Amino acid sequence: MKELIEKIKSFEIDVNFNTLGEFIKAIHIDSINYHAFINAPENIGDYGRNILTVDPFECILINWPAGVESAVHHHKGLFGYVWVLEGELDNVSYKFDNNKLLEYSIDRYERDGLTPEPDGIIHKLRNNSKTKRAITLHFYYPAIHSFEGMKIFNLENGQVGILSKQAKTANWSLNTGHFKEILENAFEFVSLKKT
């Protein structure tokens, strides 16, 4: 893992969606020794994050216990990739149209699968396994120094939560100070099964 961090720190060309993707594709997955860097989640039902570096782009190792998923969230002003190191991860994509949040694709990525996350994407990541964890390496530009202002969507009740500086994950949480604001009845959810 230290070698990967050094490669990131010595990255000297302009960071864009294509150059970041090419950088990741040039790394051999078996060269990543990540086990000592895995963090446990702080809360049950959440995922564990370990920020490895933020310069010139962010690299985070994430531990997804069995059955854990992020909230549906909106990436605004950043792009990146998610690289599956262990297990399987689903990327569920949505689009917002006329006060409806429409689920339109579910893609599964296995070991060595690379999930693109272009700027503006609304999606969630989930470990659908009931028994096995998933481990992923996330690359973002610019670095996510704070979740402040990120919108997350509650599919069950149509709430949109605006995260605060205190938020540590893109998830619904009862922790004090996690949200700056929660908007009620902000959208209607339409699942892929209904479209």
Image (cartoon, rainbow, N blue to C red):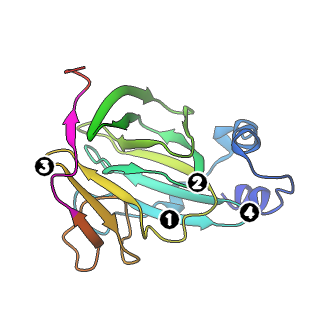
Comes first in the chain, label 3 or label 1: 1
Q: Is residue 176 above or below residue 80?
A: below
Q: Mark 4 belongs to which amino acid?
A: Pro
Residue 157 image label: 3
How far apart are the alpha carbons under marks 3 and 2?
Answer: 27 Å
SS type, badge 3: loop
Task: Name the residue beneath numbered marker 2.
Answer: 78
Give me the C-alpha separation between circle 1 and circle 2.
Answer: 19 Å
Please name the residue shown 22% across and 29% down the image: 191
Mark 1 and mark 2 residues within 8 Å of each other at the beta carbon: no
N-terminal-most mark, 3 or 4: 4
Q: Quadrant of residue 145?
A: bottom right
Which segment did they paint magenta?
183-191
Left or right, residue 132 beside residue 77: left
Sequence-wise, which precedes: disc 1 or disc 2?
Answer: 1
Residue type beneath disc 2? Leu
Bin the neighbour count of mark 4 within 10 Å (Cα to Cα): few under 14, some 14-19, many 20 and up. some
Residue at 57% x, 33% y: name it: 112
Residue under label 4: 56
126 horizontally vs 79: left or right: left
**C-alpha distance separating marks 3 and 4:** 39 Å
Amino acid found under the numbered disc labelled 1: Asn
* Residue contact between numbered discs 1 and 4, judged by CB atoms under 8 Å: no
Q: Secondary structure at mark 2?
A: loop
Quadrant of the rendered structure where residue 114 is? Answer: top right
N-term mark: 3 or 2:
2
Q: Which residue was labeled with disc 1?
A: 50
Give amino acid for label 3: Asn
